[in-house]
């Protein structure tokens, strides 16, 4: 569609340019400054979301809020770090998932860099964005024509205010900032999907057996590609200027090119943010599911242990008063975290077999009956079956009514509710995901061959859920709750 056709379709009359106005548009900094202002506005919103996603990642990874304690920023008082750490610290208020490690167990004393140093990483980024904002704001309120007429003296001054290097400088900083934000979120997201780093969550954040479901595998690959592209786009544009107009224009800012590439980077970062938000909400649900499972299982496991060995040792009713019961449960939790790569059936048998030495160590030799080894085997079989049944029941119950809100901090709650309730992006199980075959792509049939009657035949894919979040980002809908979180943190 041509410009004339578009104006006619919109019922708008074309603007009639007066003297020098056309030249001012194409030769001055007005267009590049306008394009730059739109890019930096959206980058500011994405920087806020990066802090919120860091907060949610801390909770999903059962990290600590100690990393964002105000004292840490106070003794290294960079303004960006102070603001960022204060925001994340406030975002985490009332969270039931953050922990305070005193170093007395075998867990990590400190979180990994992607969350522990987030404020030190994002702080300089925020400062760069503030400087870029100032440069663009000044440019928007400047005279960049040539020549310039001094109203006071009436002089006509020939100069170079049309040289838009200030915009180029701002956009280079913004794209560098976008790459840094993307790198942080990429690292956090890869930690979430990796059972070696996610502290007890399943591989690829699947709610099914890991041998049959790879929910976030494509997301992991997707964000790697997106971050690679952000790395390329972070390269400077201004350094590629060439001499033009037979040497008269030996220098040119390339500001509009830089601003255009910045918009591309904004769009790519929005895709990465959307993928990260899908993953972190899935991780928070799985964390809540595990807590519900543990609450259901603990009394059953303790009861089975008391019943199996009541004649072999003096076990009191309360777990906290008997070291064997306490060790069985604490060791179960450790082994549960270590076996997330296994399918549920074999997983719980492996866990219970690994707990047998605890029972043997606590049974006093004089109290062992002649059937102790048989009792130990029966206990293992019974507890493995109990664990599997409790796990399957907990998973099914939670999937029917997923709700991680009671465990979350005030900021994560707001974003989680927006994703789950406003956008209707669900806790993902196999029943929520459709993978159309070649015959189903046109929407005429379901992947199983049945006739399709829905309004959007390809809506239930991991990619489509990411698209739902992405569209809320680009439309500005998601920025509303994000800015509410920021205002509450101030």
Image (tube, rainbow, N blue to C red):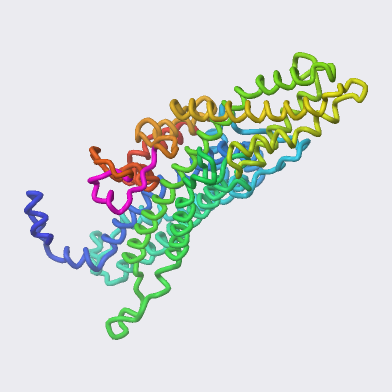
Question: Is 196 contained in the magenta span?
Answer: no
In this view of the protein, which residue sits in the foreground, 251 or 155?
A: 251
Residue visible at 27% across and 72% down in the picture: 158
For the N terminus, the quadrant is bottom left
How many numbered marks does the figure carry?
Answer: 0
Q: Is residue 325 visible?
A: yes
Residue visible at 63% across and 38% down in the picture: 347
Residue found at the very far top of the displayed protein? 317
In this view of the protein, which residue sits in the foreground, 437 or 411?
A: 437
Question: Is 434 contained in the magenta span?
Answer: yes
Q: Is residue 372 left or right of residue 221?
A: right
Residue 146 at what x, y percent from top left?
A: 25, 68
Q: Is residue 192 left or right of residue 136?
A: right
Secondary structure predominantly adopted by residues drawn in magenta: loop
Residue 184 at what x, y percent from top left?
A: 53, 51
Residue 107 at what x, y percent from top left?
A: 72, 40
Indicate whether 327 appears above or below 196.
above
Residue 155 at what x, y percent from top left?
A: 24, 67
Say which quarter of the image contains residue 438: bottom left
Residue found at the very far bottom of the displayed protein? 246
Q: Is residue 70 visible?
A: no
In this view of the protein, which residue sits in the foreground, 156 or 99?
A: 99
The span shown in magenta is 432-447
Indicate whether 395 appears above or below 72.
above
């Amino acid at each position: 569609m041509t410009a004339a056709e578009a104006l006619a379709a919109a019922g708008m009359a074309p603007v009639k340019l007066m003297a020098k106005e056309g030249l001012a548009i194409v030769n001055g900094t007005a267009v590049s400054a306008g394009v730059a202002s739109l890019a930096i506005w959206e980058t500011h919103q994405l920087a806020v979301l990066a802090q919120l996603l860091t907060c949610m990642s801390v909770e999903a990874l059962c990290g600590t809020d100690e990393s964002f304690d105000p004292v840490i920023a106070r003794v290294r008082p960079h303004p960006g770090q102070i603001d960022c750490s204060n925001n994340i610290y406030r975002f985490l208020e009332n969270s039931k998932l953050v922990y305070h490690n005193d170093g007395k167990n075998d867990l990590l004393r400190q979180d990994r860099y992607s969350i522990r140093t987030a404020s030190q990483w994002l702080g300089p980024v925020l400062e760069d964005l503030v400087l870029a904002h100032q440069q663009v704001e000044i440019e928007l309120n400047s005279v960049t024509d040539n020549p310039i007429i001094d109203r006071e003296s009436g002089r006509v001054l020939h100069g170079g205010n049309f040289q838009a290097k200030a915009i180029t400088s701002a956009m280079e900083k913004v794209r560098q900032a976008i790459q840094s934000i993307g790198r942080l979120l990429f690292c956090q997201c890869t930690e979430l999907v990796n059972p070696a780093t996610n502290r007890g969550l399943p591989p690829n954040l699947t709610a099914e057996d890991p041998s049959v479901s790879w929910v976030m595998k494509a997301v992991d690959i997707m964000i790697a590609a997106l971050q690679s592209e952000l790395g390329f786009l972070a390269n400077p544009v201004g350094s590629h200027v060439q001499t033009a107009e037979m040497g008269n224009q030996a220098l040119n800012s390339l500001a509009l090119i830089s601003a255009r590439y910045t918009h591309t980077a904004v769009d790519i970062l929005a895709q990465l943010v959307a993928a990260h938000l899908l993953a972190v909400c899935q991780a928070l649900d799985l964390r809540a599911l595990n807590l519900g499972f543990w609450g259901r299982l603990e009394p059953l496991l303790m009861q089975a242990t008391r019943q199996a060995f009541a004649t072999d040792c003096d076990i009191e009713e309360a777990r906290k008063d008997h070291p064997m019961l306490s060790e069985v449960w604490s060791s179960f939790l450790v082994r549960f975290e270590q076996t997330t790569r296994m399918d549920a059936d074999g997983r719980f048998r492996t866990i219970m077999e690994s707990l047998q030495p605890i029972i043997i160590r606590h049974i006093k030799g004089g109290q062992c009956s002649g059937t102790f080894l048989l009792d130990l085997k029966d206990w293992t079989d019974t507890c493995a079956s109990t664990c599997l049944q409790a796990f399957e029941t907990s998973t099914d119950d939670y999937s029917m009514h997923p709700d991680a809100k009671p465990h979350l901090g005030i900021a994560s709650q707001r974003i989680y509710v927006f994703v789950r309730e406003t956008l209707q992006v669900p806790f993902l199980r196999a029943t929520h995901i459709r993978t159309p075959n070649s015959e189903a792509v046109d929407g005429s049939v379901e992947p199983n061959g049945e006739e399709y009657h829905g309004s959007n035949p390809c809506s239930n894919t991991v990619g489509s859920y990411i698209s739902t979040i992405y569209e809320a980002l680009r439309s500005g809908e998601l920025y509303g709750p994000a800015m509410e979180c920021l205002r509450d943190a101030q």
